[in-house]
Amino acid sequence: MKIAIFGGSFDPVHVEHINIVKAAQSALGADKVIVIPAFIPPHKQGKALAAPQDRLAMAKLAFAGIKNCEVSAYELNAGGTSYTYLTLGYFHEKYPDAQLYFLVGADMLKDFYTWRQPETILSLAELVVCNREEDKVSFPAEQLRFFARFKKKFLSIEYTGRDISSTKARVLAAFGEDLKPYLPFDVIDYIEANELYRIKGVKEALAYLKPSRRKHTLGVALTAAKYAAQYKLPEKSVILAAALHDAAKNMPPDAPELSGFSAPEDVPPPVMHQYTGAYVAEHTLGIEDEDVLNAVRYHTSGRPNMSDLEKLIFLADMLEPGRDFKGIEKLRKTLASDLNECMYLSLKHELKYLKKRGGEIYPLTFRAYEYYKGMRKAKQ
Ligand code: FE
Ligand code: FE
């Protein structure tokens, strides 16, 4: 008997997960697929935002219609950190005669080396890397590296799927976007009925936006959320700050929301909405998180010594998928590795652009540039 084990946080489960299960069934000829939502302990700063029982319930709904596929509560019942080698050990004991396969997405392959007891995992199961056809990872170099370390190869299966991740699904859910292309209907109903992934203030902020700006704002949220875990930022704050950042962009100065607002000195008109936006966020929408408010307040100008949240919102605003300018790809690449370097390069680009167009340069932006330039120098 061939059994494929598929673990993950499933926060939430989405159509890609279902595609992987189907691909494993046909490519491996697996007799059974066991889906195992991981328990993520509360004291760990994880990205899981839905409770373990909700993630389990959603997985059960999603896989209910798939033949020879079961959802196991093993890791949830075990609690604590869900180590794969322990889980595989359990299923090896339960099915001693079965050939076990362990399914991972292509993005997990580079992390596999740092897992607990990877050799034990490989002695218990064949590693199967699932590669989506739409953005194929090239495997030959990975196989060489893998073989050098473990003296065996991993299997790979290719499947077609959609561009979706659980992070993206959480952002879409928080924004109230249509989840139908990405999530099974029953899972969408469950999310709505249980109000999962909602973030207070997001929908209120979005109500201020014209459709074109809403699209940009969604792009900012998706871009920023993608890096939230990497930069150890709370995802909810990241999504909230993104949703808020341009809330006052098209607000007339005499709007009731702006009564009592007084502008700092010498703010160029294109920069003003960062201050009015933070004001509306605080006074009308009742946002209290100072870091979120500052991310809105400095998203256009930047400033010296920004928090990581401020930097991420500033950069996501400039680099979201709707933006296009010469050199943007290099900046996007830098965003994935170094926030300070990316701030330096982005501010440099912005100053150059403003100078070329004869636009007014806000002194705070210049100071921000000098700050990140100095930081870079000190590092070299
Ligand atoms: Fe803006
Ligand atoms: Fe913006």
Image: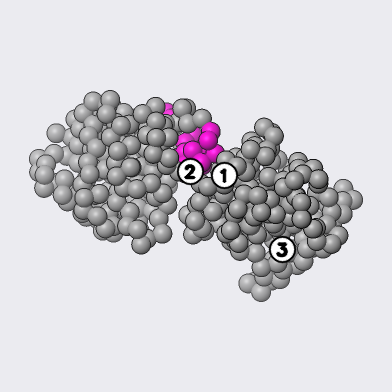
Q: Which mark is residue 198?
A: 2
Residue 196 appears left or right of 357: left
Residue 278 appears left or right of 115: right
Residue 63 appears left or right of 134: left
Nearest the eye: 79 or 380: 79
Whether label 2 lies within 8 Å of ligand 2 gets the answer no
Considering only order in the chain, which callout, 2 or 3, is on the residue closer to the N terminus?
2
Amino acid beneath label 2: Arg
Residue sitting farthest toward the right: 358
* Residue pictured at 50% horizontal, 52% vertical: 235
Nearest the eye: 108 or 90: 90
Q: Image quarter for residue 30?
A: top left
Considering only order in the chain, which callout, 3 or 1, is on the residue closer to the N terminus?
1
Q: Image quarter for residue 2?
A: top left
Amino acid beneath label 1: Val
User: Which region shows up in magenta?
Assistant: 158-177
Count of labels in the image: 3
State the image coordinates of residue 110 (x, y, percent, origin top left). 40, 51
State the image coordinates of residue 212 (x, y, percent, origin top left). 69, 33
Q: How far is disc 1 from disc 3 in space, using C-alphas?
A: 25 Å
Amino acid beneath label 3: Arg
User: Within 10 Å of the Cα at label 1, are there few (<14), some (14-19), or many (20+) other Cα atoms?
Assistant: many
Q: Which mark is residue 275?
A: none
Q: Which element type, helix, strand or loop, lies under badge 2?
A: loop
* Residue designated by label 3: 303
* Residue designated by label 1: 202
Q: Which element type, helix, strand or loop, lies under badge 3?
A: loop
Q: How far is disc 3 from disc 2 in space, using C-alphas?
A: 30 Å
